[in-house]
Image: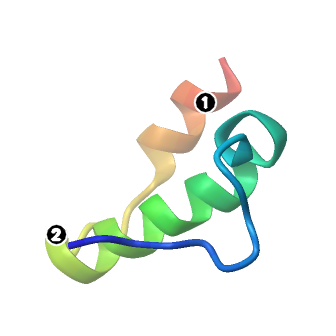
Amino acid sequence: GLVELAGMGHMTPVEAPEAVTAQIRELTLTYLGVKDTTTVNAKEDA
């Protein structure tokens, strides 16, 4: 499906990556049931 971040434009991935990341995490939890983000967080911090 289509997910829209209300009030955000086409440059959102560059200007507000945290909003995009939060939405992706929410979708992942909803549809894949992934709850342990320890590995993901470690990779992002590297």
Q: Residue at x 45, y 55 (%)?
A: 37
Q: Residue at x 79, y 49 (%)?
A: 16
Q: Looking at the picture, does residue 46 appear above or below residue 28? A: above
Tag 1 residue:
44
Q: Looking at the picture, does residue 39 appear above or below residue 8? A: above
Q: Within 10 Å of the Cα at label 1, are there few (<14), some (14-19), or many (20+) other Cα atoms?
A: few
Looking at the image, residue 20 sits to the left or right of residue 36; the answer is right
N-terminal of the pair, mark 1 or mark 2, is: 2
Picture coordinates of residue 35 (x, y %)? Answer: 35, 71
As shown in the figure, which amino acid type bears the numbered disc 2?
Answer: Leu
Picture coordinates of residue 18 (x, y %)? Answer: 73, 53
**Mark 1 to mark 2: distance in Å?**
20 Å
Q: Residue at x 83, y 40 (%)?
A: 15
Q: Which mark is residue 12?
A: none
- The structure's colour scheme is rainbow
Q: Quadrant of residue 2?
A: bottom left
Q: Within 10 Å of the Cα at label 2, are there few (<14), some (14-19), or many (20+) other Cα atoms?
A: few
Q: Looking at the picture, does residue 36 appear above or below residue 38? A: below
Count every numbered label the image shows and give the total.
2
- Residue at the far right in the pictured view: 15
Looking at the image, residue 31 sits to the left or right of residue 38; the answer is left
Q: Mark 1 and 2 residues: CB-CB less than 8 Å, in contact?
A: no
Q: In the rendered view of the protein, which quadrant contains the C terminus?
A: top right
Q: Residue at x 60, y 55 (%)?
A: 20
As shown in the figure, which amino acid type bears the numbered disc 1?
Answer: Glu
Q: Secondary structure at mark 1?
A: helix
Picture coordinates of residue 29 (x, y %)? Answer: 32, 75
Q: Which of 40 and 16 lies nearest the eye of the viewer? A: 16
Tag 2 residue:
32
